[in-house]
Amino acid sequence: MLAFVLVALGTLMILPKNDDVANADQRQPTLVLVADVESGTATADLTAQVEVKMLEVDARATGALASLDDLPDGVLVADHVAGQQLLASSFAANVVEGL
């Protein structure tokens, strides 16, 4: 009997709650790098090195870009690593303005 109660409680703990389902609907598209990219890389060269991931609102950085259409013209102002979100503030019109 005790084993049945423990299994039932364990099952209830792993089932999604209404809050979890609601949070899944609050995911937003976010551009994330799939490879390391050096500063000075032109926006046109980034398209093959990014992917759109659906992230929870709390996991998105402020200013994170949502699509390839959001990429501004210019260059990256700093080195970026794989897994890093691309931000609007990561770009400048040219390398000199990024300094």
Image (cartoon, grey):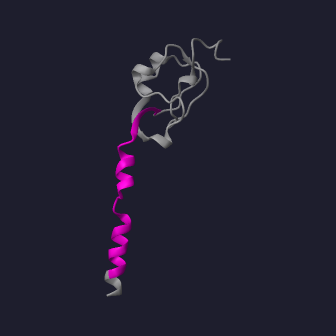
Q: Residue furthest right?
A: 99
Residue drawn at x 51%, y 16% as measured from the top left: 42
Residue drawn at x 39%, y 40% as measured from the top left: 27
Quick check: 18 above or below 67?
below
Q: Is 45 placed left or right of 6 in the picture?
A: right
Q: Nearer the viewer, residue 90 or 35?
A: 90
Quarter of the image that includes the C terminus:
top right
- Image-quadrant location for residue 89: top right
Q: Nearer the viewer, residue 3 or 51?
A: 3
Residue drawn at x 53%, y 23% as measured from the top left: 88
- Image-quadrant location for residue 26: top left
Report x, y in % for residue 60: 49, 38
Report x, y in % for residue 41: 54, 19
Quick check: 5 above or below 50?
below
Report x, y in % for residue 81: 55, 34
Q: Tell whether position 92 is magenta.
A: no
Quarter of the image that includes the N terminus:
bottom left
Q: Tell whether position 6 is magenta.
A: yes
Report x, y in % for residue 93: 57, 12
Quick check: 49 above or below 17?
above
